[in-house]
Image (spheres, grey):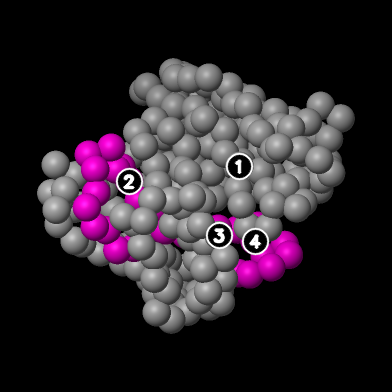
Amino acid sequence: GDSVTQMEGPVTLSEEAFLTINCTYTATGYPSLFWYVQYPGEGLQLLLKATKADDKGSNKGFEATYRKETTSFHLEKGSVQVSDSAVYFCALRGETSGSRLTFGEGTQLTVNP
Amino acid sequence: DTEVTQTPKHLVMGMTNKKSLKCEQHMGHRAMYWYKQKAKKPPELMFVYSYEKLSINESVPSRFSPECPNSSLLNLHLHALQPEDSALYLCASSHFGGDFYNEQFFGPGTRLTVL
């Protein structure tokens, strides 16, 4: 079945540091890939997505590239801010999954001033 | 309006109580979802409604009873819950079918505590 493996947290960075959160997946065919963010006390927000190989999703300074050859969708940001502190979930929707999303375990990011 | 709203924000209930969670969206979405999220874990899918009909039930215990009275509203009726049911309950919605499943919009959740 489909699965998502995410970099274990927690991750603690200083403001303006470079961020990478690794995400690899197992799925047949060409799944759609997502990064969701959950700020404290809130629901999930879609941060970015990519629906085919080599697509790059980007939003709010975050980027991730759909790499079919390495089955990866790593999240990056060049300069993090305190306001980026949140839990980040990598997720996929398989070709035959219908509406089901498969989530990674989540990575807690804390950015210190 | 790109918002999913959920009420109440917090709910405390005893094991013999009956309560309901409510979810509303006005984005014209015809798929709506209930998820359960335990602390420090990803959301777990419970139910999916497509065009107001239940299409997925992830073997959820019958003490959780979903209802979709119309295309904008989704309820989750709770009865005889257990303390282990304490969690954040998230509602989400999306367009239906094909690539339209790609973007699920989540509400802020209801924090449920069962005593």
Marked residue chain, label 4: B
Q: Which residue is mark 1?
A: A102
Amino acid bearing label 2: Leu
Amino acid bearing label 1: Thr
Q: Is residue A71 above or below residue B29?
A: above
Q: Estimate the spatial distance between the alpha carbons at disc 2 and disc 4, rounded to whole Å.
A: 23 Å
Same subunit: marks 2 and 3: yes
Seen in the image, is A27 located left or right of residue B40? right
Q: Estimate the spatial distance between the alpha carbons at disc 4 and disc 1, rounded to whole Å.
A: 13 Å
Residue farthest to the right, as pictured: A69
**Which circle, 2 or 3, is nearer the viewer?**
3
Same subunit: marks 3 and 1: no
**Which circle, 4 or 3, is nearer the viewer?**
3
Q: Estimate the spatial distance between the alpha carbons at disc 1 and disc 2, rounded to whole Å.
A: 18 Å
Same subunit: marks 1 and 2: no
Q: Which residue is mark 4?
A: B101
Q: Which residue is mark 2?
A: B88
